[in-house]
Image (spheres, rainbow, N blue to C red):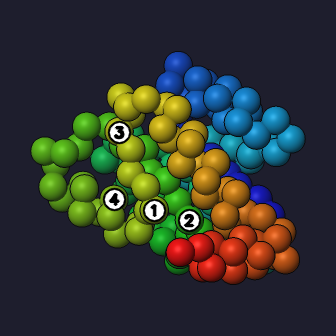
Amino acid sequence: MASIVYTPSINELELRFLTLLEMAFPKKRFEVCYSIGELSTRLGMPSSNIKVAVFFAVTRKEINRILPLYDLIADVKSILVLSDLEEDKETMMKAHLLRPRYVAWADCDLIDIVTVTKRMVDLYDAPQGENDRRIRSADMKP
């Protein structure tokens, strides 16, 4: 199973996120894609086993670049990290077309994004047998 992070640029925010992610998952490696081409190639592999993705799409331009990959990420559980696009309703509508499981703002506490990522990876990116046991035990809880 695999998990990826898409970040079109490396700045302080992304570096801190990757550092926190490494601390949360000391034995798991996340693939990092730095361009849409690299992301598209990885998602388009016939044996693509990506279950969880974090997209740093902090601009309208980046969301417009990710949208054409919709078919490739339809089954991927995703987290979208956006800049303050709240006033830009058209871009927000486009962002929601990607059907993210969680949307965060670039100026939020990165620990929140790492915590959600950890929960998603623990649930969706576990080996198949282990994932089945987790789902069954969660269904049995009152």
Q: Residue at x 33, y 59 (%)?
A: 95
Judging from the image, what secondary structure is the residue with disc 2 in?
strand
Q: Say which residue label 4 marks.
A: 95
Among numbered discs 1 and 2, the one appearing first in the sequence: 2
- Image marks 1 and 2: residues in contact by CB distance under 8 Å: yes
The image position of residue 9, as x and y in percent, is 54, 32
Judging from the image, what secondary structure is the residue with disc 3 in?
strand
Q: Quadrant of the N terminus?
A: bottom right
Among numbered discs 2 and 4, the one appearing first in the sequence: 2
Q: Which mark is residue 77?
A: 2
- Cα separation, mark 4 vs mark 1, equals 11 Å
The answer to whether residue 47 shows anywhere in this view is no
- Cα separation, mark 2 vs mark 4, equals 14 Å
Tell me: 50 left or right of 14.
right
Q: Nearer the viewer, mark 3 or mark 4?
A: 3
Q: Residue at x 15, y 55 (%)?
A: 89
Q: Amino acid at mark 3?
A: Trp
- Cα separation, mark 2 vs mark 3, equals 18 Å
Label 2 CA crowd tier, 10 Å (few <14, some 14–19, many 20+): many
- Cα separation, mark 1 vs mark 2, equals 6 Å
Q: Say which residue label 3 marks.
A: 105
- Image marks 2 and 4: residues in contact by CB distance under 8 Å: no
